[in-house]
Amino acid sequence: MTTQSATQPKPYPRDRLAAQPIGYWTGAAYREVVGRIRKELATESLTQPHWWILNHVAAAPARWTRTELTAKLQRYDDQGIDFDEVFDDLVGRTWLTEDEPGAETLTLTEAGEAGLARARERTLRSHEQTHAGITEEEYVATLDVLRRVITNLGGDSDLPE
C-alpha cells in the first residue's frame, strides 16, 4: 500500500468516493488510529485498558472501585480484556493503590502519575498527527456523520463520559 503525504490523500472523483463502503473505511481508520495509540502506549508497557483505567482514576481519585470501573470500561473492550489482570499489573507496578479496606477505591500513586504523564505525552503526539491538516469544522462534521451512522443502525452515539 502506498502512502500519500501526511495531510493529503490521493484525490479521487466524488462519485467514486461516494460509492465506497463505509464499513471498510471506518475499519481502516480504526486500525490506523488505535494501532498508533497502542504502539505509543506499548513503549510504557501499557495497553489501552491500562490507559483507560489510569485516566479515569486520575480524573476522580478514590472514586472508582475495580468493579465499578470495569463495568464502565467494558463498553470499550473489543479484545476480551481481563480487567483484573490490568488492575493487578498497575497495583504491582505501584502505579495504583486500593484504599479503604472493604471499599477498595483506586488512587494513582506518584509513580502512576508520572507514568500517566509520559503516556499522555506520547498519545498527544499521536493525536496531533491524526489531526494534521484537518480543521476543527471537518473533524466535528466527521464525528457527526459517524454518530448518525451509529444512530441509524440502532447503536449508542452518545459521547463517552
Image: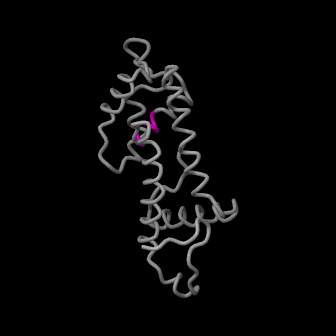
Is residue 50 found inside the magenta-colored segment of the image? Answer: yes
Quarter of the image for residue 15 reads bottom right
Residue located at (58% from left, 48% from top):
125
Q: Return the residue nearer the eye: 35 or 102.
A: 35
Q: Where, quadrant-wise, is the N terminus in this rendering?
A: bottom left
Quarter of the image for residue 11 reads bottom right
Q: Return the residue nearer the eye: 155 or 139.
A: 139
Give the answer, above or below, for where 53 lies relative to 140.
Answer: above
Residue located at (30% from left, 32% from top):
85
Going by the image, does 145 lie left or right of 2? Answer: right
Q: Return the residue nearer the eye: 28 or 154.
A: 28
> Looking at the picture, how far across and down is residue 154, in whole percent?
44, 62
> Looking at the picture, how far across and down is residue 38, in whole percent?
43, 47
Residue located at (41% from left, 31% from top):
68
How many discs mark residues in the rendered view?
Answer: 0
Give the answer, above or below, for where 67 lies relative to 29.
Answer: above
Residue located at (41% from left, 46% from top):
75
Q: What kind of colouring is applied to the model shown?
A: one colour
**Main secondary-structure element of the magenta-colored stretch:** helix
> Looking at the picture, how far across and down is residue 62, in whole percent?
50, 21
> Looking at the picture, how far across and down is residue 121, in whole percent?
57, 40
Is residue 1 found inside the magenta-colored segment of the image? Answer: no
Q: Which residues are magenta?
A: 48-53
Q: Where, quadrant-wise, is the C terminus in this rendering?
A: top right
